[in-house]
Amino acid sequence: MIVTGSHYGTEQASSAYLFANALIEKGHKIAQVFFYRDGVTNANKLVSPASDEFNLPKAWLAFAKEHRIPLQVCVAAALRRGIIDEQQAKEQGIDGANLASEFELSGLGSLAQTMLTCSRVVQF
């Protein structure tokens, strides 16, 4: 599954989340969720919506933990949008990181490898 939509402002990421849950409920397996383009904003641990709003990044974290599904984030797209992990922060001399715990920075090669072993790829 590829998510290219931002955590807020479009329905792409929330539709992907609902679809992923429906797949699991029906007994399907998800090899990974790959966040690309503006979809990388779903990995920002500093997102803090109002208390009456759905916290989509937090929901992705719970989903990944519960179902043991890797959440991969395109490193190039993430860095362009200010999403950074501890290692990248050190390498670039930036104080602090904001990549949420269950998300992992990776390249398009990771996506390509996974696509070789899957029967379907769905993009949101």
Image (cartoon, helix red, strand yellow):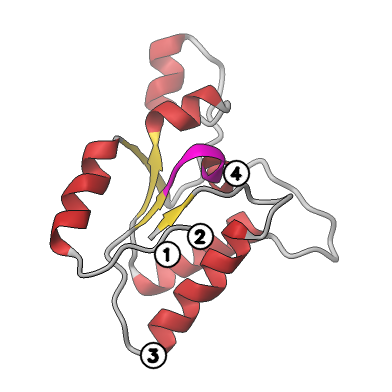
Q: Which mark is residue 25?
A: none
- What secondary structure predominates along the stretch shown in magenta? helix
Q: Secondary structure at mark 2?
A: helix
Query: Which numbered disc, 3 or 4, marks the residue that appears first in the sequence?
Result: 3
Query: Which numbered disc, 2 or 4, marks the residue that appears first in the sequence?
Result: 4
Q: Which residue is mark 3?
A: 26
Check contact, mark 2 vs mark 1: CB within 8 A: yes
Disc 2 residue type? Leu
Q: Which residue is mark 1?
A: 64
Q: What's the magenta region? A: 35-39
Tally of marks: 4
Q: Is residue 21 above or below residue 88?
A: below
- CA gap, disc 3 and disc 4: 29 Å
Task: Decide if residue 48 is on the left or right side of residue 12.
Answer: right
Percent position of residue 41, x then y: 58, 42
Q: Which residue is mark 4?
A: 45
Disc 3 residue type? Lys
Q: Is residue 93 visible?
A: yes
Query: Which numbered disc, 2 or 3, marks the residue that appears first in the sequence?
Result: 3
- CA gap, disc 2 and disc 3: 20 Å
**7 within the magenta span:** no
